[in-house]
Image (spheres, grey):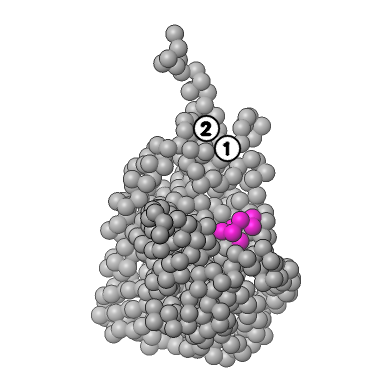
Amino acid sequence: MSFLKKSPWILHYDGSSCNGCDIEVLACLTPLYDIERFGIINTGNPKHADVFLITGSVNEQNIPIIKRLYEQMPDPKVVVAVGICATSGGIFQECYNVKGGIDKVIPVDVYVPGCAARPEAIIDGVVQGLGVLEKKYAALKNKPSKTAA
Amino acid sequence: MGTRTIIPFGPQHPVLPEPIHLDLVLEDEKVVDALPSIGYVHRGLERLAEVKDYNELVYVAERICGICSFIHGQGYCQGVETLLNVEVPPRAKYLRTIWAELSRIHSHLLWLGLFADSFGFESLFMHCWRVREKIVDIIEETAGGRVIFGSCKVGGVRRDISNDTLKRIRGELAAIESQYNELKPTFLKDASVNRRTVGVGMLSREQAIALGAVGPTLRGSGVAQDMRKLGYAAYKELQWEPVVETAGDCYARTVVRVREVTMSFDIIRQAIEKIPAGPIAVKITGNPTGEFFSRLEQPRGEVVYYLKGNNTKNLERFRIRTPTFANSPPLVIMLKGCELPDVPVIVLTIDPCISCTER
């Protein structure tokens, strides 16, 4: 974690999950797991966030919301799909209102397996996401800016 | 009369881990109307009964909601067992009771934490969840999962808890309860907390009955109705009384839940004392036939499963009426006339579980 220069903030959105992964995401923030010690906090504002944690699968009703939240987040940003529903639809794959994993709508960087995903797995997923974030940040810095020159 | 403004609340809102949308019609700071709109979490899992047989459907039922997962599985199993005319062994009934009450404690502690967060008391939120983690540890040790138990099956339960483990758990629960008792006075007596809850979000006894409120929302308005009194699982053999408060405000609903946690500790203790030896499951043959309403008390209130079998592996109809759905009309009444900063507090006092509601 020593390579991090800033505190990554998280935006959490529940796609159509059963709540199991959501309460595990919240459990990460509470004293036993306490990811706040790494400077990670859960923000409600997409414009403050670096990491987008999504639980649950996508459906017609929440596609525009997921897209809008993703677009509102500043670059560089990382998407972490938490739980099997966010990965593929999981047990609800055959439901008529489930379109599948989050990657049907926005690009996903890290997949966290599990039903429900354990807090340790979620933290591991976020830490991997931070590695991706750092790479994206470096790529953004090296890219020649359009206004310069 | 002030200017009317409509403020959208949700679907992504910091106070709610789940997406629900409310259009709040305001006159200055006063809420004059609230229009809920839902459908963000709808999956359509009732229809999975067409593709999954009645044994596989237990897994789906448990995932209706991750917070009350065990009780969903239990309600579904009890319904199918009635259709199959199967009597569950007594030890399985006691184990179901113990797991159901453990999940009630974890759900109520989770709620108390989120509720504290809704009025900005973040350290209280953290303390509630710290205590809750110990309950989750017991759940993980006995059932294997932290939030999804997977231990209920048609005909009984999947795993046993040895008597030695039960005895140790009783000791652990005593320690957890004393930690919980340290948190209780903050919810019940702290002046800054009471200023946010007393007299806020009123729901009279008559309104609660007329609008069909259930669970702590109903009991907070002075109606002693608790589905556990139907005597399913081992509840009829244990000593307990429904928790009732009469004020009908946010404070009363909080007190109901605070006292219910204590009661759940007591029910588990009694169940551990009385648990009989014997098998934990019976063999299941045949297919469900006929129809049945299975009613249970969830942490959030009464849940109803309607099951209809037509003597095939798949149920013909699987329908669920969840407590948050029943508590939504009372919520709209509670919100009318409140002030905008009180909206998160009032919304949380019905303990909304959107993934149950929309399935």
User: Measuring 47% from the left and 41% from the top, which residue is drawn there?
Assistant: A46
Identify residue type, mark 2: Leu
Task: Indicate whether B280 appears above or below A75.
Answer: below
Residue A61 relative to residue B137: left or right: left
Question: In which quadrant of the rendered image does the N terminus of chain B lie?
Answer: bottom left
Seen at 51% across and 32% down, the residue is: A132
Q: Nearer the viewer, mark 2 or mark 1?
A: 1
Circles 2 and 1: CB distance less than 8 Å? yes
Residue B242 visible to the viewer: yes
Mark 2 surroundings within 10 Å by alpha-carbon count, few (fewer than 14), some (14 through 19), many (20 or more) = many
Q: Which residue is mark 1?
A: A8
Subunit under mark 2: A
Q: Residue at x 39, y 54 (%)?
A: B3
The one of B73 and B333 positioned closer to us in this rendering: B333
Residue type at mark 1 is Pro
User: Start and end of the magenta stretch?
Assistant: B116-122
Residue bearing the label numbered 2: A133
